[in-house]
Image (tube, grey):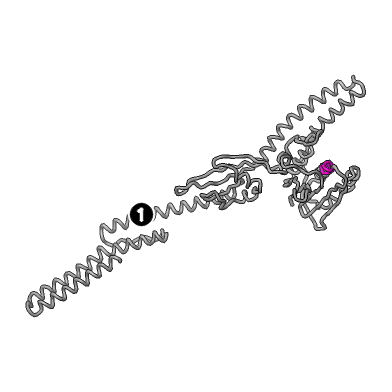
């Protein structure tokens, strides 16, 4: 029951007692009756004064508490004219001002943090206290894949790991961390793409090594080739050509991008590709879209990529009845073959410099393809579907 109701009961009780007293003194003691009546008037004024000085400030403070409960931090309490109560009112108003200031500051920080998280190139995945994913920023949504999700599930809290996506050149570093919030540790993941940094470091390293080796070998060959017999000279020439092929990998020109129709560019390579497949006794099929598919590419470098991919497909086919299918869709090219396929452990190392599963392989084909497609801004993958056992090299071009 509210305090005002107790005050009302007290006033009613006093009124009842006063009525009884007045009734008893009206006939027996007239003079005492007037004294009692004057006392009652004074008591009424005192009760009104008591209400103004005690219950009204109390009601004001109760209203302030309701404001805080409703998170109304803009309204202020008015002074009530009672010294002690006004001290509480001023303190309460100052507290509301501080709360409002802190609330605005937290809202601004939260807004800034939300914008920062959404704009961050690093993937940020937020979890609840049980470790279940509750939200992720756009960068994390783009990076998410079954391999990344599996790595996240296996990663202990406070640890980090680095994974390479099977059949793709993508390399990610994943951190599993936590932050305290209201007494609980909330875990979250940071996913950082290392692809560009690692690729640039790899390229800088193998460029220096290849150029040094090519320079030394070619200088040595040029100095002694004239004094050797024909057979030995041919072997040295083959060695020089071998090293030169390595050197060509680091001399890829910057692509001169222009809008081209993807199906038309593939069709332009048809005669040469058919010749390659016919020689290897492999059936070649084309499934080119009639829909206009303008993409930005360098036609010369694109032909090198397409030829290298088809050559790899042909080399993977060891049995009769092999076939290669080239399919185009708007901004996408897929080369499919029914060769031996790619084992999961091999898929992890594809597009790594100089990695090859062939006995005489140099690991240059996929390296050349990777660098050219990366320079085009393409996304690409090379994977074997273990349901239909077909291997697909898929390239997504930029419009």
Judge from the rendering whether residue 317 lies leftward or rightward of residue 22; answer left or right. right
Judge from the rendering whether residue 266 lies leftward or rightward of residue 28; answer left or right. right
Does 59 appear in magenta?
no
Question: Are there few (<14), some (14-19), or many (20+) residues within 10 Å of tag 1?
Answer: few
Identify the secondary structure beneath mark 1.
helix
Q: Position of residue 213 (x, y in %)?
A: 77, 27
* Observer able to see residue 48: yes
- Residue 188 lies, with reference to residue 203, above or below; the image says below
- Residue 4 lies, with reference to residue 372, above or below; the image says below
* Observer able to see residue 300: no
Q: Name the residue: 45% across, 47% down.
A: 183
Judge from the rendering whether residue 288 lies leftward or rightward of residue 57; answer left or right. right
Quarter holding the N terminus is: bottom left
Q: Position of residue 37 (x, y in %)?
A: 13, 74
Q: What residue would you read off at disc 1?
A: 94
- Where are the magenta residues, as a range? 311-317
- Which residue is situated farthest in the top direction here? 227
Q: Name the residue: 89% across, 24% down.
A: 233
Q: Name the residue: 77% across, 41% down.
A: 369
């Amino acid at each position: 029951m509210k305090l005002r109701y107790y005050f009302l009961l007290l006033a009613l009780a006093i009124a009842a007692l006063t009525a009884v007293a007045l009734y008893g003194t009206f006939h027996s003691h007239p003079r005492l009756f007037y004294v009692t009546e004057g006392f009652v008037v004074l008591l009424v004024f005192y009760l009104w004064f008591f209400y103004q000085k005690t219950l009204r400030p109390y009601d004001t403070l109760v209203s302030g508490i309701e404001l805080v409960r409703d998170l109304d931090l803009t309204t202020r309490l008015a002074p009530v004219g009672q010294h002690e109560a006004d001290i509480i009112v001023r303190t309460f108003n100052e507290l509301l001002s501080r709360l409002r200031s802190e609330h605005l500051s937290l809202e601004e920080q939260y807004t800034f943090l939300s914008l920062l998280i959404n704009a961050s190139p690093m993937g940020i995945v937020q979890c609840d206290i049980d470790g279940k994913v509750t939200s992720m920023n756009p960068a994390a949504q783009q990076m998410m894949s079954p391999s990344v999700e599996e790595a996240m599930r296996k990663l202990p809290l406070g640890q980090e790991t680095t994974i390479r996506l099977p059949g793709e050149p993508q390399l990610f570093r994943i951190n599993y961390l936590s932050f305290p919030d209201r007494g609980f540790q909330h875990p979250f993941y940071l996913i950082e793409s290392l692809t560009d940094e690692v690729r640039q470091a790899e390229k800088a390293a193998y460029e220096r090594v290849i150029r040094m080796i090519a320079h030394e070998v070619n200088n040595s060959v040029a100095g002694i080739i004239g004094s050797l017999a024909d057979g030995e000279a041919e072997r040295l020439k083959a060695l020089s050509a071998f090293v030169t092929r390595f050197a060509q990998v680091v001399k890829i020109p910057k692509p001169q991008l222009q809008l081209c129709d993807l199906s038309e560019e593939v069709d332009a390579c048809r005669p040469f590709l058919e010749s390659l497949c016919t020689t290897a006794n492999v059936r070649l099929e084309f499934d080119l879209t009639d829909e206009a598919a303008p993409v930005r590419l360098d036609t010369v470098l694109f032909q090198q990529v397409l030829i290298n991919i088809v050559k790899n497909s042909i080399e993977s086919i060891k049995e009769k009845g092999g076939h290669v299918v080239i399919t185009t869709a708007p901004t996408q090219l897929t080369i499919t073959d029914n060769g031996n396929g790619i084992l999961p452990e091999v898929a992890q190392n594809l597009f790594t410099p100089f990695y090859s599963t062939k006995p005489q392989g140099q690991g240059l084909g996929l390296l050349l393809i990777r660098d050219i497609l990366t320079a085009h801004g393409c996304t690409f993958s090379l994977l074997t579907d273990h349901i239909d056992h077909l291997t697909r090299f898929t390239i997504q071009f930029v419009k």
